Image (cartoon, rainbow, N blue to C red):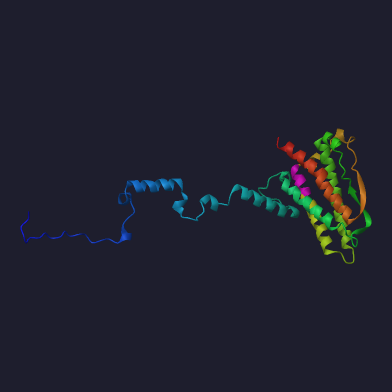
């Protein structure tokens, strides 16, 4: 029991430090909290960079799928110009989306000229390849024979489209819409020729010495309207070209 009248002096406390000067360390928050924080960062490394900041892999150029789509788009843009695309797959035509794009353009051109009467007739007949396919005979043909028929048909069809383009330009007042469809067909056939060359079709189209006599001549006939020309173009892409590229791509994957 203390003596009455005496009092104890209060202990002196060190001056308070500002709240934000204290360091966030394991000793300050305790080992349990610091361990939880380290475990959370290990599970989600993105927290260390901050919310909304892309990872280094994301900044490097996107996912592989995005790169593939960009490369495909770039190839389709440069092929009509005859320019090579670095890094493009050698068998780009094996991608079904590529051939479908040209088939769609051909169908659109055919549909646009179905009811065309003025400016759609040619002053002379144009020779085109026969697009009829005997599927039984086609399956029994060697891939080299298919390549010969497709390569020769594509060359004749390209000449026919160019001839139609020249005849259309000689008209007094050619339709701009028709000219656009013809120009797209010329560009599309040039691109398809490059794609088939990358697939090796021109090598297969060279007949062997012992097979020269057995090679059947290319069947042809003539057309006199732009609508019939575009119909041949569409049928050729959907028929012989699709059949040949499908078989050639399957053999290339083996």
Q: Main secondary structure of the magenta part?
A: helix
Name which residue lies at 37% across and 46% down.
35
**What is the x, y in percent for residue 60?**
55, 51
Total marks placed: 0
Q: Is residue 16 above or below residue 43?
A: below
Q: Is residue 5 magenta?
A: no
Q: Is residue 58 left or right of residue 74?
A: left
Residue found at x 84% / y 41%:
148
**Whole-percent x, y for residue 201 in the image:** 78, 42
Quarter holding residue 196: top right
Q: Can residue 206 be seen in the rendering of this structure?
A: no
Residue closest to the far left = 3
Q: Quadrant of the C terminus?
A: top right
Nearer to the camera, 108 or 61: 108
State the residue in front, 5 or 100.
5
- In percent of width and height, residue 179 lies at 83, 61
- Residue that protrudes farthest toward the bottom in the picture: 173
* For residue 141, above or below residue 68: above
Q: Residue at x 62, y 50 (%)?
A: 66
In the displayed structure, 138 sits above or below 174; it is: above
Q: Say which residue appears at 60% left-offset and 47% top-offset.
A: 64
Q: Quadrant of the N terminus?
A: bottom left
Q: Position of residue 113 (x, y in %)?
A: 86, 57
Between 204 and 253, the residue placed more toward the observer is 253
Depth check: give the residue in front, 155 or 61. Answer: 61
Query: Magenta stretch?
Result: 192-199
Q: Is residue 178 at all visible to an observer of this figure?
A: yes
- Give above or below for 197 relative to 213: below
């Amino acid at each position: 029991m203390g003596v009455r009248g005496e009092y104890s002096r209060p202990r002196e406390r060190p001056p308070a430090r500002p709240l934000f000067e204290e360091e966030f360390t394991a000793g300050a928050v305790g080992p349990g909290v610091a361990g939880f924080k380290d475990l959370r960062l290990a599970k989600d490394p993105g927290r260390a960079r901050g919310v909304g900041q892309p990872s280094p892999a994301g900044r490097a150029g996107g996912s592989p799928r995005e790169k593939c789509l960009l490369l495909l788009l770039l190839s389709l843009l440069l092929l009509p110009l005859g320019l090579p695309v670095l890094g493009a797959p050698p068998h780009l035509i094996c991608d079904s989306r590529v051939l479908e794009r040209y088939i769609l353009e051909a169908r659109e051109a055919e549909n646009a000229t179905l009811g065309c009467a003025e400016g759609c007739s040619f002053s002379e007949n144009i020779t085109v390849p026969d697009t009829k396919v005997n599927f039984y005979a086609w399956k029994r043909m060697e891939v080299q024979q298919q390549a010969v028929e497709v390569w020769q048909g594509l060359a004749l069809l390209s000449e026919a489209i160019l001839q139609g383009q020249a005849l259309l330009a000689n008209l007094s007042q050619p339709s701009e819409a028709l000219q656009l469809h013809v120009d797209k067909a010329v560009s599309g056939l040039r691109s398809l020729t490059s794609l088939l060359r990358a697939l090796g079709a021109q090598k297969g189209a060279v007949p062997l010495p012992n097979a020269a006599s057995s090679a059947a001549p290319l069947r042809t006939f003539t057309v006199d309207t732009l609508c019939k020309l575009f119909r041949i173009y569409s049928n050729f892409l959907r028929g012989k070209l699709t059949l040949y590229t499908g078989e050639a791509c399957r053999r290339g994957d083996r």
